[in-house]
Image (spheres, coloured by chain):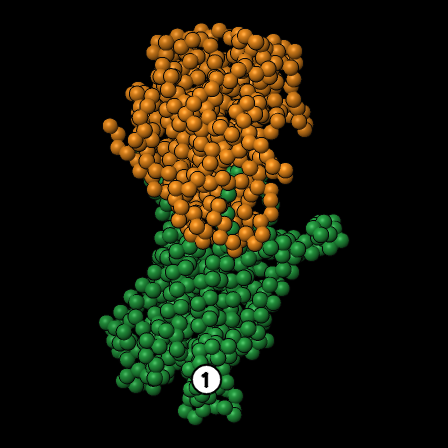
Chain colours: A green, B orange
Amino acid sequence: MKPTFSKGGRLGFLHSTFDAFETFLFVPNTVTKKGSHIRDVNDLKRTMIVVIIALIPALLFGMYNVGYQHFAAVADPVSQAMWLKCWWYGFVRMLPMIIVSYVVGLGIEFAVAQKRGEEVNEGFLVTGLLVPMIMPIDIPLWILALAVAFAVVFGKEVFGGTGMNVFNPALLARAFVFFAYTPKISGEHVWVRGVTKGGEYVDGFSGATPLGYITDSVSSGAATLDFGGTTPMDWFWGFIPGSIGEVSTFCILIGAVILIWTGVASWRTMVSVFAGGLVMGLIFNLVGGNAYMEMPAYYHWLLGGFAFGAVFMATDPVTSSQTNVGKVITGLIIGMLAVLIRVVNPGYPEGMMLSILFVNALSPLVDYYVVQANVRRRNKRLKTAKQ
Amino acid sequence: MSKVIKLKRGLDIRLVGEAQRTRVEMPLYSTYAVVPDSFPGITPKLLVAEGGKVKAGTPLFFDKARPQILFTSPVSGTVSAIRRGEKRRILSVVIDADPTMEYEKFEVASPADSTRETITDVLLKSGLWPMIIQRPYGIIANPSDTPKSIFISGFDSAPLAPDMNFVLENEYDNLAKGIEVLKKLTDGKVHIGLRNGQQGVLNRLNSAEQHLFEGPHPAGNVGVQIHHVDPINKGEVVWTVDIQNVAVIGRLFNTGRVDMRKTIAVTGSEIVDPKYVTVMVGAPVVQIATAVGIKRQAAGDSFRMIIGNVLTGCKADADSYIDMYHNQMTVIPEGDKYELLGWIAPRFNKFSVSHSYFSWLMPRKVYDLDTNLHGGKRALVVTGLYDRYLPMDIYPLYLLKACMAGDIDKMENLGIYEVLPEDFALCEFVDPSKTEMQAVIADGINLMIKELS
């Protein structure tokens, strides 16, 4: 079958597509030609699959929470107590989103690889799962498709494909929705499935996220913060409305352990993002001023997309800083900026996305100075040698 | 005693097929050959024709750019063939060996009484000058340079590498003489890097400045040792000589003969009984491997012969011969087989530095690795990984990218003068993007030579 798809074969134009499926099934029989005769068995497929495995706890809990929040909204405590029913409810709602994301994204990836005559990159396997996980459950599928297409084409392919992009594609998809279809990704009604549908709507139920409540209470000048009846414990375990994957800090931490242990993501980035958030929170504690500023700093870790961003977004090796020192610096900036945006600008209840995207753009600059320090060390050595 | 230089970064890959400490003297083979391509960066011009008679030490060809650098025959006999490739490029000069060796006689005086010029002259005429390699770039040294120092690595840390203390156990006199010769060539010191904790003949070489190293491969790479003892700056020249070649040089000054006999380790999982053999440079690789014994191959299986180690060696074929610079041969299985769903399987028998596999559970396991690439070529995606396998104050990823971009200034600033392709072999081994990093660095170095000469 292979000759049909090879160059010059009858279906030769589908070469990249055939290759993608072939290498998916079999590790090919390619042997080393130049350089080292033996190679580590690790490859990018493996690396990407590890990220997906790390995402699974957050994904499964996210699905469960979709159902849990829905049954809370429609005041059905019996169903709410049946975890499998909750999960199934979420799974059925989430599956089309994942399918749409993969079909659109991989479609573009395959087409581009085909056109360039390259092998299909694995990068989108992760992006394609990340995108639905950082969307609200009620996002219309056509918007999702549009966002994915935008992210893949303008976030990645125009820069030359995987490994060349400046901005995290998944976050770019979210930013696209955020700015183009703002009502679909903010406010009170999009985070819980079914709230917007008339009939089963429950009086007095609001689907707002804890961050939404907080900003509301800040703008109304309340002396104490309103968390919408949720506790930090709920935030940690994830029983709150929010983007599908971001809710459970606990599940995200499981993913973080997998990523750090396998060495796929940088612990330096993760730790410094969390540290940056804490530092900024503590600074606000010192300054004081309003209830939000005086909120315990570690709450920021548990709220919104902070943990998810720190673990899965900030650590993207392509768009994050490439030097170890740079990783620490940019990580700190991400954490501090995210909290700064949250607290100071009530227009954006969630600062993580913008903070990471901004630092993506900043990373090459930080790296430049880190590498320049190495160059200076080398030149200094030359000068001392000459004396 | 000098302090121990401890290196943390790097990796020891434990492979099946380490050489037993037995040494077999190989008989004189019927044919030997000298391969111009085995010498870095030369264009050969022939001095002999087919049918010509040569002795050990008779010049066969010279370098077009630097005609004073001669390349001589390792054996005596008749030039039986000059094999040529495309555009009449010389592939090898083949010599049918005489049953008894005859040597060219070289006038040698005690190095202490000789001038730098006479020593250089003898080394050039005898064809041993190409044993002296220049940094930067890793090419044959320029006889008119005076290096700031000369470095010798006294141990090889690569997978299945020979134990140099065993290889050279009877060569003390030649080694000591060789170091005396080298000391005449530099204004600075002759440094020798030794593995901390190992004792043997090399520790007795007191006339060289000894440095002790500790840590995984590539601690034995001479470039790494230079970096930690006396790093090369822009405009500086350092020379390096392989430890076994120091003994060959010493032998010339002790006997007046070119005797390129050396001991190599025949290693690898496909060798029945890996051991050390003593051969003359130019000996045919296939005959050595079959004499030591290659394992019987099942149908559909094949093996790869490598001159050198699995990380940096050259692939050998039927027309390959032991060269001046390698002390090892490795034979491993070819990995030209498909593997079902390999990227998700646990792969217990494969080695990886990644914790997404299970090698970390079995640190003492020895592996039988093949030549499969284990994945497809991709863009450079991961970061922070390569830094862990280059024990130098250099950012490997940035240097690689500078080489890919051909940016001379950046390459210079980021440390191209201090590295050779071999220093990137481990980065290449662990790279999940399967980039050919040694080739990238080699291209970068070639560009530097072209632009700056």
B406 w.r.t. B145: above or below: below
Residue closest to the eye, B330 or B6: B330
- Say what amino acid the circle numbered 1 marks: Ser
The image quadrant of residue B229 is top left
B316 w.r.t. A47: above or below: above
Residue A322: percent from left, percent from top: 43, 53
Residue B165: percent from left, percent from top: 37, 24
State left or right for residue A281 relative to residue B400: left
Query: Is residue B353 among the parts visible in the rendering?
Result: yes
A259 w.r.t. B186: above or below: below
Q: Which residue is pictured at 39% across the width and 62% down the height? A: A256
Residue A261: percent from left, percent from top: 39, 56
The image quadrant of residue A337 is bottom left
Q: Which quadrant of the rendered structure holds the C terminus of chain A?
A: top left
Pinpoint the chain carrying mark 1.
Answer: A
Query: Is residue A303 among the parts visible in the rendering?
Result: no
Residue closest to the eye, A89 or A342: A89
Q: Which residue is pictured at 62% across the width and 63% down the height? A: A108
Q: Which residue is mark 1?
A: A79
Q: Which residue is pictured at 47% across the width and 70% down the height? A: A59
A243 w.r.t. B33: above or below: below
